[in-house]
Image: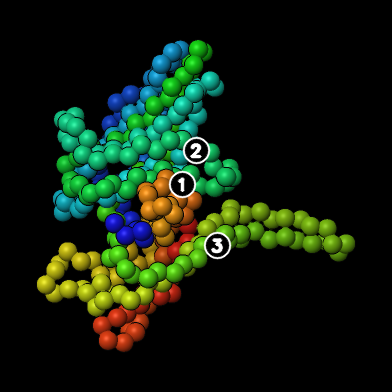
């Protein structure tokens, strides 16, 4: 898979998947709220019983039955907050895709809990599956807490769920990008020069371009309908559809990295869709792309 990847369609948002909570209790909101793109509308899920010894688990899964059988390459838990028991020795979140009926895992990825660099930094949990699966599967989130002597409840608060396809340009495509922190707040000054901050939520913004795209990746291949070219991609997402952008997914050694996905991945929308420019011959570039974070 290319180091650059973009989730361009969330099947959870566009179809009425069946949500089910195997282990746990919904303490606020409803599970259907997890299909709402307003990430601040959190659902709180608590383990059904306290665990004085052993494990306190929460298992949430939903059934994907999209009619056009779109591939699921990316699954995610958006805007989450996890509160384990005070003496928890470990917390692990496992994102997986299961065959209906509880068969063996098709694909999965285990993500160890980490601490955010800032309380304001959006915390999303992403798993890129090694190979896409199609409709008719349970997408599962399993939170497992190993407790100590006193135990307690595990609570997971989350804003939305994601499951859908990825768009990845072929290897060898040169891409350059930058990421900035946008602070819409202002600093007011008194006559004497004293500061009065008017704080607003800080957001991340991405700008980038992809160069040396062949014609088939810029405008499609008449002999290969499986290629989602840039022109058709932009028609489908425009400026108003939510996307997930990963400028890179691999670490310096070329291995899949949860840290890289967490810190560089942006859940947002395209403020500017950019343009496709001809470079000469059969080469093109997609430039002027701006993606702003959504919360």
Q: Can residue 273 be seen in this view?
A: no
- Secondary structure type for disc 2: loop
Colour scheme of the picture: rainbow
Real-space CA distance between mark 1 and mark 3, rounded to the nearest whole angstrom: 18 Å
**Residue 42 at what x, y percent from top left?**
45, 39
Residue wearing tag 1: 259
Residue wearing tag 3: 180
The label number, if any, that marks residue 43 in the structure image: none
**Residue 212 at what x, y percent from top left?**
33, 76
- Secondary structure type for disc 1: helix
Earlier sequence position, callout 3 versus callout 2: 2
Earlier sequence position, callout 1 versus callout 3: 3
- Report if the CB atoms under discs 3 and 2 are less than 8 Å apart: no
**Residue 60 at what x, y percent from top left?**
32, 32
- Secondary structure type for disc 3: strand
Residue wearing tag 2: 114
> Residue 200, relative to residue 58: is it above or below?
below
Q: Dividing the picture into quarters, in which one does residue 52 lie?
A: top left
Q: Can residue 248 be seen in this view?
A: yes
């Amino acid at each position: 898979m290319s180091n650059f990847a973009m989730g361009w369609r969330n099947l959870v948002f566009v179809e009425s998947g069946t949500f089910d909570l195997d282990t746990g209790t919904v303490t606020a909101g409803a599970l259907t709220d997890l299909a709402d793109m307003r990430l601040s509308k959190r659902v709180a899920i608590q383990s059904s019983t306290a665990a004085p010894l052993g494990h306190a688990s929460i298992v949430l899964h939903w059934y994907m039955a999209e009619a056009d059988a779109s591939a699921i390459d990316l699954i995610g838990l958006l805007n989450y907050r996890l509160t384990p028991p005070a003496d928890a020795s470990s917390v692990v979140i496992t994102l997986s895709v299961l065959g209906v009926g509880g068969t063996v895992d098709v694909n999965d990825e285990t993500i160890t809990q980490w601490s955010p660099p800032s309380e304001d930094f959006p915390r999303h949990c992403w798993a890129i599956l090694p190979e896409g699966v199609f409709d008719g599967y349970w997408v599962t989130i399993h939170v497992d807490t190993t407790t100590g002597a006193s135990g307690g409840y595990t609570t997971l608060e989350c804003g939305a769920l994601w499951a859908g396809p990825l768009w990845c340009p072929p290897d060898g495509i040169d891409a350059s990008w930058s990421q900035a922190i946008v602070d819409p707040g202002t600093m007011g000054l008194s006559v004497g020069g004293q500061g009065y901050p008017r704080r607003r939520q800080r957001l991340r913004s991405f700008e980038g371009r992809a160069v040396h795209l062949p014609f088939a990746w810029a405008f499609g291949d008449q002999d290969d309908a499986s290629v989602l070219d840039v022109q058709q991609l932009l028609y489908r997402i425009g400026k108003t559809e939510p996307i997930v952008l990963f400028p890179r997914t691999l670490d310096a050694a070329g291995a899949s990295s949860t840290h890289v996905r967490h810190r560089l991945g942006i859940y947002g929308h395209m403020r500017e869709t950019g343009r496709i420019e001809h470079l000469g011959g059969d080469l093109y570039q997609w430039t002027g792309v701006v993606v702003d974070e959504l919360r």
